[in-house]
Image: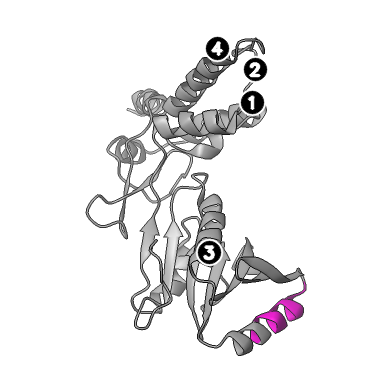
Amino acid sequence: MRRGIPVENGPKVVTVTGTPGIGKSVFYAYFLERYSYENEDITIITASFAKTERSSTKDQVVVFKKGKAVAVVKDVQSAMDALILETVDEAGDKLLYLCDGPPDQIPRAAQMVCFTSPSERCFDTLRKWPACPKLFMPLWDLDELQTAADELELEMNTMNTCFNREDVEMDRVMVADRIEQRYHIFGGVARECLSTDEAYVNGRQAFIEKTIANFDQVDDVRRRLRNMESSLVHHCICYYVPNAIDPSKYQIAEPTAFVKRLLVQCLTKLI
């Protein structure tokens, strides 16, 4: 995401998306801070959205000027809309929208960067506008995950990784080993690989097992083994990665070793 998105004749909307759990909201926060620093004359309206059954609804609007929040409104739709209108009137063409989640509408007076999990509803809305590129974030690689855990000094004290607080270097080795184990289950999805909540991680692993156990069509299993999409998208086992040539397009990553083993077992039962 380059500096100077809101330029004349630039794209109306840029959507940053990718596999759920890889850190789109974290990148959103980083983008906000970095862009504010490099573009002090730009007013930024940030809006977060909660997905509902048929659409998405704003639940918070914050206005930033020179990197600082100058106005915040939560939950009350009329108040949030009023703040947006007031800000648009004051900022003129020096305005950028940042959306965390699929927006309920596309702004007319300014450009927007939208950070969202893959959503056909959101993409359908964006297709109505010409030149609205989607950029797919990559998965994390193992070295990045282990480096992040080390920098954040994460503790993963479980029955399988019992730490000796007097040996910091051994702790790091154990955390790195734990992350590698998770990497072979969840791939480069940071939410699971870096979680310090072992119950959550076990629950996500059980969800993968249950999802694959419920497959009853041979073709669905084969398509996943071939890194292909099927009629139903299961984000817990189908990971989006950007196309190496065109990052606005995506492909399905190779299943993890854990997922591949379960798929082969499932296929054997179905044949």
Choose between 236 and 264: the one closer to the eye.
236
Q: Earlier in the sequence, mark 2 or mark 1?
A: 2
x then y, percent, for residue 237:
44, 38
Q: What residue type is labelled 1?
A: Glu
x then y, percent, for residue 178:
52, 20
Q: Residue at x 54, y 21 (%)?
A: 175
- Tell me whether the residue at label 3 lies in contact with that at label 2, contact meaning CB atoms closer than 8 angstroms: no
Residue interval drawn in magenta: 76-85
Callout in the foreground (3, 4): 3
Residue tagged 3: 37
Query: Does residue 269 show up?
Result: yes
Numbered circle sitting on residue 158 = 2
Residue tagged 4: 170
Q: Residue at x 54, y 19 (%)?
A: 172
Q: SS of the residue at dot 1?
A: helix
Q: SS of the residue at dot 3?
A: helix
Quarter where residue 29 is shown: bottom right
